[in-house]
Amino acid sequence: MSNEQYLTGLAMLQKIHGGHAGEAIVEGMGDISPKLVDIIINLMFGDIMQRKELDLKAREMAILSSLVTQGHPSPQIRAHIEAALNVGIKKEEIVEMFLLIGFYAGFPATVNAMAIAKDVFANWS
């Protein structure tokens, strides 16, 4: 992987997660696994998130859907609700998606996601 791809990945990380939970999650792993941070920045943000087949809104909706269906990754759900808002997804769209997911992933997962969304929305500026 090139240094250019890493720098592109850092720029995308900042665009999507800058100053919020997602950036903190990645930075927080640096002391225990710098290699994991390198992989995330290079592969996810420097490659996958750069592809043109889906825009960032579609990517964040897909990521949030996947996280909520898992039912437990609260820090990542918080980070990607923030990311979704950063890329222009409306609060109402996030809530509607969570309602839909309830029928496929179960309502406990949806209730948990809604609670996280409520907190993020209340603190979003």
Image (tube, grey):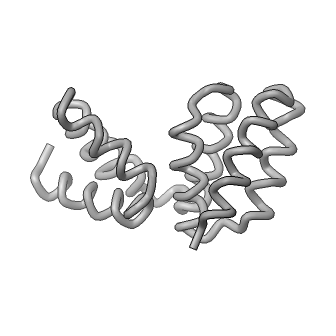
Q: Which image quarter: residue 35? A: top left
Q: Position of residue 12 (x, y in %)?
A: 35, 61
In this figure, what is the number of numbered marks? 0
Foreground pick, 21 / 10: 21
Q: Which image quarter: residue 74? A: top right
Q: Quadrant of the N terminus?
A: top left
Q: Residue at x 38, y 63 (%)?
A: 18
Q: Position of residue 23 (x, y in %)?
A: 36, 52
Q: Residue furthest left?
A: 3
Q: Residue at x 45, y 51 (%)?
A: 21
Q: Residue at x 79, y 49 (%)?
A: 97
Direction from residue 48 to residue 115 in the image, left or right? right
Q: Quadrant of the C terminus?
A: bottom right
Q: Which image quarter: residue 68? A: top right
Q: Position of residue 54 (x, y in %)?
A: 55, 57
Direction from residue 121 to residue 12 in the image, left or right? left
Q: Residue at x 53, y 61 (%)?
A: 56
Direction from residue 118 to residue 78 in the image, left or right? left
Q: Position of residue 60 (x, y in %)?
A: 57, 52
Q: Residue furthest bottom?
A: 125
Q: Residue furthest right?
A: 103
Foreground pick, 124 / 59: 124
Foreground pick, 123 / 16: 123
